[in-house]
Image: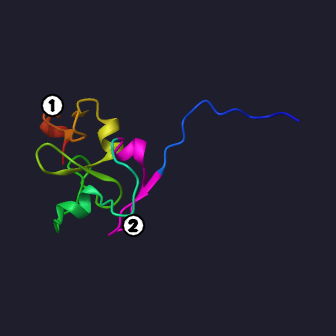
Amino acid sequence: MTSITLDFQISPLIVCRRCKLCVHTSCYSPDTAPGPDWTCDSCRAESRRVICALCGAGGGALRLATDHSLCHVVCALLVPEVTITPRGLVDLSLVPTKRSN
């Protein structure tokens, strides 16, 4: 019988206590300890207009940006001018106007 070895670490899932968004800690917030009281950035923003500053769509895993807007984690990863600050905020300051929503 052959055994399979995985060469990656498994990232625990965290679930927002308000909207039930479920994300990997390594993708969304690596410094966050999983727990029952975790709240996602969208719910903490308590804004009626919860859309991505890059693509204009709502829903999904949105992270807080340095300009207080929200941005999908995937959009932030796909736009080369976007950086993540040491505090985990999405920095959109280098994104050209034509590439943002």
Closer-to-camera residue (27/70)? 27
Asked if the magenta segment contains residue 21, the reply would be: yes
Q: Is residue 99 above or below residue 71?
A: above
Residue 46 part of the magenta segment: no
Residue annotated with mark 2: 20
Residue positioned most to the right? 1
Determine whether 72 is above or below 42 in the image: above
Residue drawn at the location 48% of the way across and 49% of the way down: 12
Please identify the quarter of the rendering in which residue 58 is found.
bottom left
Q: Say whether residue 56 is left or right of residue 22.
A: left
Residue in the picture at 25% in, 40% down: 88
Circle 2 — which element? Answer: loop
Q: Which residue is mark 1?
A: 94
Q: Give the distance between the C-alpha atoms of the residues marked 2 and 1, in whole angstroms.
A: 32 Å
Which of the 4 image quarters holds residue 9?
A: top right
Counting from the top left corner in percent of width and height, residue 30 is at 36, 41
Residue type at tag 1: Leu
Q: Is residue 42 left or right of residue 98?
A: right
Q: Is residue 53 left or right of residue 28?
A: left
- Identify the residue at image location x=32%, y=61%: 59
Q: Amino acid at mark 2?
A: Lys
Q: Which residues are magenta?
A: 13-30
Between 16 and 64, the one lying in front of the other is 16
